[in-house]
Amino acid sequence: MRRAGVLVLLATLALTACIPKVDRPAGYGNAPQRPYRDPPPRRDDPPRPRETTPRENRPRDDRPVQDIPGRDTGEVTTLPAPRPAWEARPVSADAKTIPDTTYIVRPGDTLSRVVDRSGASLEAIARANDLEPPYTIRTGQRLQIPGGRYHQVRRGETGIAIARAYGVEWSRIVAVNALVEPYVLRADQRIQIPGEASGGTASASERARAFTLDIDDILTGGEPALASNQAPARPIATPRRVLPSNAVVTAPARLASGGFLWPVDGKVVKRFGHGASGERNDGIKIAVPVSTPIHAAADGVVAYVGDGIAALGGLVIIKHGGGWTSVYGHASKLLVQRGQSVKRGQTVALSGDTGFADRPELHFELRKGRTPVDPTSQLPRT
């Protein structure tokens, strides 16, 4: 019996010697390794685009998606966001029409009290009588009250919504009221509406449809009116936080050092200014593959994200301070939110052929105040 046990032991040792020795796999004997997942995004990173392509249709090579030839559907993918302020806060066309009159200042009157009694705007009365801040008036003084239609602004109303309500171009309202940057209205402010009161049968929706939105409207009439005790919103750090429609977004105080950089690397296929057929291009068109990352040309705050201007499709507008604004059109995916602070070179969208694009391209503009500037005069030479 003892001899049989010895024979079994010797056989086991011989079999073990025949098995080749291998290294243990990494992590052997430790806690199970978790499957790989992308690291969490940093605070300033844009959100990763969601994969919507069926698995069997995904490209089989290792190239980045933006390098694979293709064409988008012409639709714009946006982050969840509230409606623009001019849609979220409609305006009633209830302006009051007053005649040209003369007002004699009474004891205790202030210009604000004259405004309330006359129905005209403070700025219009001040201009008509050459008054300067702090608008000192004296008893017995004769003030000219300019007649016209005056709309009293309510909190949250925008210039665009006011213009749509009356079927008047916002640029005309800006001109007649001598509005200046930053073009933010005040609640209870009165503004003059040019033109005669409509005697036709056009409805409010018909007047709104007749209004064509453009970039100048967004820059000068896109912010909601501030209440007297309301401060502008602080810029948000990431697109995961969404500002409400009635939050007022202001530009940085000044343009950051370093100037502007090219938003994409591609061929300029349409230059700034008048084309051969006479049409005017307020920016440049840069041909790039679909889904090419579009970078912010400089530090700034996003003033608009959406597709409200049909010709430009997916659109991002960034205010940079010092009166400078940059515009990025024809995007297929929008990766930032209104009111978000962005850095120079940060990806704000992916290119596409949305809107009236002739090909996959980026429409890029720079503006100083309300004036379009040739971007190539401000960008590094390539």
Image: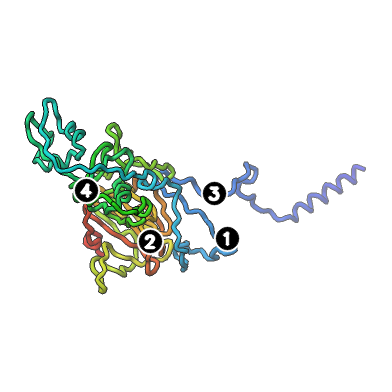
Classify mark 2: helix, strand or loop: strand
Q: CA distance from mark 4 to mark 3?
A: 43 Å
Q: CA distance from mark 3 to mark 2?
A: 32 Å
The location of residue 228, given as percent across then percent down, is: 27, 33
Residue occupied by mark 1: 54
Marks 1 and 3, the one that precedes in the sequence: 3
Marks 3 and 2, the one that precedes in the sequence: 3
Q: Residues within 10 Å of mark 2 (few under 14, many from 20)?
A: many
Coloring basis for residues: rainbow
Residue occupied by mark 3: 37
Q: Nearer the viewer, residue 221 or 28?
A: 221
Q: Residues within 10 Å of mark 3 (few under 14, many from 20)?
A: few
The location of residue 74, given as percent across then percent down, is: 44, 63
Between circles 2 and 4, the one closer to the viewer is 2
* Labels 4 & 3 near each other (Cβ < 8 A): no
Q: Nearer the viewer, residue 194 or 304?
A: 194
Q: Quadrant of the N terminus?
A: top right
Residue occupied by mark 2: 330
- The residue shown at (35%, 62%) is 311
